[in-house]
Amino acid sequence: MIELEVQALSHSREGLLIDIGKSMVAQGFALVRQRLVDDANGVLLTMVVRGPSRKQRALESALDALPRIISFEISPHVQGESKPHFAASRSVASGYVPPPTPSEVVTETGPAAAKPSVSTTAVPKAPPQPAENIEPPAHHVPAMVEPRPAASSTAPLMAAEPEPDFIFVRPSTPSQAPAAVPLDPFVEVTPLDPDVQAVENMLPALMSSYPKIFPLVKELERTVAEGARESTLQWAGQRMGAWTFERNHAAGSTLSVEQALDSIGVPAMRLLVEIDHKGNQLHIRNSPLCTEEGRSNCKFFSGYLEGLLGPLVASQSLSIFEVCCRSCGATECVLAIMD
């Protein structure tokens, strides 16, 4: 037996767990835990499954054949290791600042495009006058240059240039690019061992309140760490299932999985919730434990059936897992019971 971590990306979540759960059951895999969240790319599903190693390629082929799965990855599951979902969005900070729009440029006489060109005429320099009658000086005495005649005061004046129009540009603050909405990468919560002491403290109250136990189960869920939530609920279910078996069915004989489910499991579950029995599956309608989106508490029911039916099953290899849950978008919670 191996444990695999399956990460899948889909466009929609409705019925997703049912479709994938059926494919896994058909290949002999049991669900250990699951998580389903929305993302900018679609719906991110993470599942940890347990099954025969020889069936891994068959599982990959079955998932590849599902048209609603865009892409998926299967890798060996490492206990206690948090692994980000391969398709989760990453937020990217952008430093781009767009240029100011043309409406932000204001001129005194018109738009910037009508800016007049200003030309200036350079005053030509007078050509150098050649030195006249310069004789070589004796004893290297500096030569005397005949003074240059003064310029005539009647020389034509330069035409006055018109003063240019000055253009004023209003300083503008560049518009900021819209801030990117941060999307935290999907990271699975590290699973922890069950809080046994919390269960033992709650057990007397659960027994005295049976079968109206769900307010106490919800209170137990809120008191434990997030990583220990599912394992604690499963342990509480096992303790309550074992207590129910000892009280009502301790003298029972060894049965097959189907017989134990029909004669004991289904009647005991109907005392707690409204269910439909279809083959090896139990469909729980309006589960009072699975009301908050993204927080499946079906582990309590699977643990309850393990504690109740485990002592009766001849094969001693009872396997119960959650096919889908209403807190993850399904219309009802579905448990599959196999040996």
Image (cartoon, helix red, strand yellow):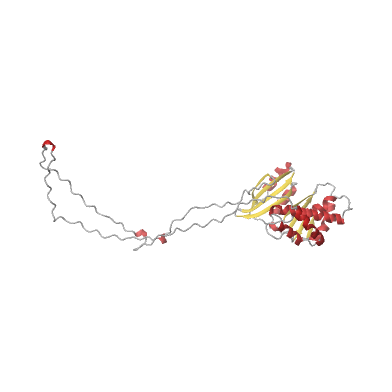
Between residues 181 and 229, which one lies in front from this camera angle? 229
Q: In the image, residue 167 lies at what x, y percent? A: 34, 60
Nearer to the camera, 149 or 137? 137
Is 68 situated left or right of 100 in this image?
right
- Residue at left offset 12%, top offset 36%: 139
Foreground of the two, 150 or 54 = 150
Residue 205 locus on image (x, y percent): 79, 60
Q: Is residue 245 left or right of residue 98?
A: right
**Where, quadrant-wise, is the N terminus in this rendering?**
top right
Q: How many numbered marks, from 0 up? A: 0
Q: Position of residue 220 (x, y in %)?
A: 74, 58
Farthest top residue in view: 139
Residue 210's quadrant in the figure? Answer: bottom right
Work out whether residue 62 or residue 40 is closer to the camera in this orientation and state it: 40
Q: Residue at x 36, y 58 (%)?
A: 113
Q: Is residue 266 visible?
A: yes
Measured as percent of width and height from the top left, residue 105 is found at: 39, 60
Determine which quarter of the picture holds residue 171. bottom left
Q: Quadrant of residue 324?
A: bottom right
User: Is residue 335 visible from the viewing direction of this image?
Assistant: no
The image shows residue 54, relative to residue 41, as above or below, that is above
